[in-house]
């Protein structure tokens, strides 16, 4: 896949473009061998607690929500290598994940956000014709209310390939 040169490098400033360059310049395939070993250990959750904490950590950065600067939006910036390896790992079982969330989650499906936006736009258009309004209320930060042990049990039951990785990153 094409590595975007402008993609953020995360805490360590290791960008996908930089990794791609390393692989292309490596005539001995040493990068590929090491990446494969790391990815295998990653999937098994086979890391020391200290290394796990280092790689799984992220830093919160406060960005202004708008030009008025009345409120901030916390953005988490994590380890680039974790982001890339986790993405690659999940890509291998994308169809399995999609089969479990299709119809209930749009944010994790390809084009899901666009589907949600167009659906909400159409709902608002239909409501406007009737003199109604569409109101969206977010009463809680849903991710922080998730029972992590239940999440791990569900992952183990439906996507056992991700169990160790999920335990390592979220529990």
Image (cartoon, grey):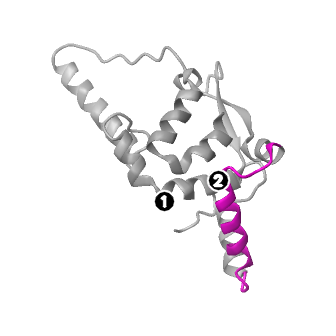
Which residue is at 66% across, 68% downward?
Answer: 36
Q: Is residue 138 visible?
A: yes
Q: Is residue 133 above or below residue 32?
A: above
Percent position of residue 162, x then y: 55, 48
Q: Which residue is farthest bottom?
A: 27
Disc 2 to disc 1: CB gap under 8 Å: no
Q: Is residue 18 visible?
A: no
Percent position of residue 52, x then y: 76, 45
- The quadrant the C terminus occupies is top right
Q: Which residue is mark 1?
A: 92
- Quarter of the rendering containing residue 77: top right
Q: Is residue 149 above or below residue 91?
A: above
Residue 156 sits inside the magenta stretch? no
Percent position of residue 14, x then y: 74, 59
Q: Secondary structure at mark 2?
A: helix
Q: Which residue is farthest right?
A: 50
Task: Give the extent of the magenta segment.
Answer: 26-49
Q: Which residue is mark 2?
A: 44
Q: Secondary structure at mark 1?
A: helix
Which residue is at 65% across, 66% downward?
Answer: 17
Q: CA distance from mark 2 to mark 1?
A: 15 Å
Q: Earlier in the sequence, mark 2 or mark 1?
A: 2
Q: Residues within 10 Å of mark 2 (few under 14, many from 20)?
A: some
Q: Residues within 10 Å of mark 1 (few under 14, many from 20)?
A: few
Q: Label the magenta part by its dominant secondary structure.
A: helix
> Which residue is nearer to you in this view: 17 or 150?
150
């Amino acid at each position: 896949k094409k590595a975007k040169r402008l993609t953020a490098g995360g805490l360590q400033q290791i960008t996908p473009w930089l990794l791609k360059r390393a692989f292309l310049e490596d005539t001995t395939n040493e990068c590929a061998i090491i990446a494969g070993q790391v990815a295998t250990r990653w999937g098994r959750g086979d890391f020391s607690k200290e290394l796990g904490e280092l790689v799984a950590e992220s830093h919160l950065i406060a960005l202004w929500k708008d030009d008025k600067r009345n409120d901030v939006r916390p953005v988490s910036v994590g380890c680039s290598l974790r982001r890339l390896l986790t993405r690659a790992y999940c890509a291998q079982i994308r169809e399995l994940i999609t089969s479990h969330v299709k119809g209930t989650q749009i944010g994790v499906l390809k084009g899901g956000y666009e589907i949600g936006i167009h659906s909400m736009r159409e709902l608002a258009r239909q409501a406007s014709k009737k003199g109604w309004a569409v109101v969206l209320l977010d009463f809680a930060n849903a991710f922080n209310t998730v029972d992590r042990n239940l999440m791990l049990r569900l992952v183990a039951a439906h996507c056992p390939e991700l169990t160790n990785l999920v335990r390592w990153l979220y529990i």
